[in-house]
């Protein structure tokens, strides 16, 4: 299959856009994926999505640690310029000022990162949910401090121009690329947590939070479509070959023994045959999206996924109903649109 990739331009914005989350959802079950990620509808919910909120707050911590890595890999003047310039993009000017005040007087990058990480969580807007005893701010802070203790600050953040601290850097990069597969043309979007120098190559980083990390968790990234897409996007962005990735897993809460399962790094790479298989999957899944766009009524049900993550799929009432009832259910669903390209920076007040 002939394929090509390039960064999206203003004239390409009319093309349909797909991110990996949506594509995986559609390939898991077209009914669920089309409804949730193409029509942006979900069943009315009660309570908070604490897992999502916790993950968002922790990713702000990971971004801050990378920002501190960037600051300290440069000289004092350039480091301060980079901190201010890229920090405003990541956190907004008001919140960055608060974070900067919290780290003043730190003796080294580790201490500054820890003090700043606590301040990031304090200003993230996250608050404890009485029904969720795992994702508490105390547990999140403990995990963040353990993460910083293990972080390798010598693996510098990628910079487009090392002499210009305001040039592009590999921290929380939202990518948007145009993919051409035969006659099919579309945009593929996402957000890369980090791009770093490691030894003599550039490698991408992806951060994950989970309640349990084991060999099965690590092995899943050997075939992950997300990692493959990110390697392609990072190569386009940096204009250098990026075919390796580090997946940084952090447990919340930390287990009693930090040396087992609390912090896990999976090292993976991508070869030509893996890109070819990813393209086949991409073509198949985008074709499903195109065929059933806006039409979950006729989309196939993959009933093997009706019980995912040890709980029933929220779409079961829809799938078990007749067409008239299905249309009523769709009309009563909540609209919840999300894109990896969206940036919404909180203020200090949350």
Image: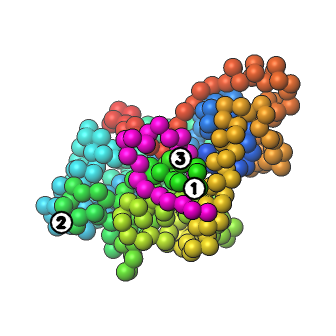
The answer to which of marks 1 and 3 sits earlier in the sequence is 1
Q: CA distance from mark 3 to mark 2?
A: 35 Å
Q: Mark 2 packing: few (<14 Cα in 10 Å), some, or many (20+)?
A: few
Element type at mark 3 = strand
Q: Is residue 8 magenta?
A: yes
CA–CA distance in space, label 1 to label 3 = 9 Å
Front label number (3 vs 2): 3
Pick the residue in front: 80 or 195.
195
The tag earlier along the polypeptide, 1 or 2, is: 2
Q: Which mark, by number, is residue 181?
A: 1
**Residue 298 inside the magenta-drawn segment:** no
Residue stretch rendered in magenta on the structure: 1-21
Q: Badge 1 local density, few (<14 within 10 Å), some, or many (20+)? A: some
**Would residue 163 be visible to someone looking at this image?**
yes
Residue closest to the far front: 183
For the C terminus, the quadrant is: top left
Q: Earlier in the sequence, mark 3 or mark 2?
A: 2
- The spot of residue 227 in percent (x, y) is 55, 62
Disc 3 marks which residue? 186
The residue furthest bottom is 200
Most foreground residue, 181 or 93: 181
Where residue 63 sits in the image (x, y, percent)? Answer: 39, 54
Q: Is residue 269 left or right of residue 171?
A: right
In the image, 84: left or right of 273?
A: left
Q: Which residue is mark 2?
A: 163
- Density class for disc 3 (Cα within 10 Å; few <14, some 14-19, many ≥20) is some
Query: From mark 1 to mark 2, how far is it between C-alphas?
Result: 38 Å
């Amino acid at each position: 299959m002939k394929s090509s990739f390039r960064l999206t331009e203003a004239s390409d914005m009319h093309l349909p856009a797909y991110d990996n989350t949506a594509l995986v959802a559609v390939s898991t079950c077209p009914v669920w994926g089309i409804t949730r990620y193409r029509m942006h509808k979900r069943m009315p919910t009660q309570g908070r999505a604490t897992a999502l909120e916790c993950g968002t707050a922790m990713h702000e911590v990971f971004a801050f640690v990378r920002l501190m890595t960037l600051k300290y890999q440069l000289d004092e003047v350039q480091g301060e310029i980079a901190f201010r310039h890229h920090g405003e993009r990541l956190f907004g000017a008001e919140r960055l000022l608060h974070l900067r005040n919290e780290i003043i007087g730190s003796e080294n990058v580790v201490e500054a990162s820890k003090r700043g990480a606590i301040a990031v969580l304090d200003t993230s807007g996250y608050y404890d949910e009485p029904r969720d005893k795992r994702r508490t701010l105390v547990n999140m802070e403990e995990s963040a401090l353990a993460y910083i203790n293990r972080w390798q600050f010598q693996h510098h953040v990628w910079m487009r121009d090392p002499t210009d601290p305001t040039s592009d850097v590999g921290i929380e990069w939202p990518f948007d690329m145009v993919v051409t597969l035969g006659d099919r043309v579309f945009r593929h979007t996402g957000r890369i947590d980090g791009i770093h120098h490691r030894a003599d190559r550039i490698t991408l980083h992806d951060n994950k939070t989970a309640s349990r990390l084991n060999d099965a968790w690590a092995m899943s990234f050997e075939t992950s479509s997300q990692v493959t897409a990110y390697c392609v996007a990072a190569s386009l962005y940096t204009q250098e070959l990026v075919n390796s990735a580090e997946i940084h897993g952090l447990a919340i809460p930390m287990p009693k023994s930090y040396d087992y399962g609390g912090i896990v790094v999976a090292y993976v790479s991508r070869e030509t045959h893996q890109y070819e298989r990813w393209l086949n999957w991409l073509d198949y899944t985008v074709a499903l999206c195109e065929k059933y766009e806006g039409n979950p009524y006729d989309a196939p049900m993959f009933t093997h996924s009706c019980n995912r993550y040890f709980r029933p799929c929220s779409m079961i009432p829809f799938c078990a109903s007749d067409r008239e009832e299905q249309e009523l259910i769709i009309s009563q669903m909540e609209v919840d649109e999300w894109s990896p390209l969206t940036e919404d920076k909180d203020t200090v007040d949350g």
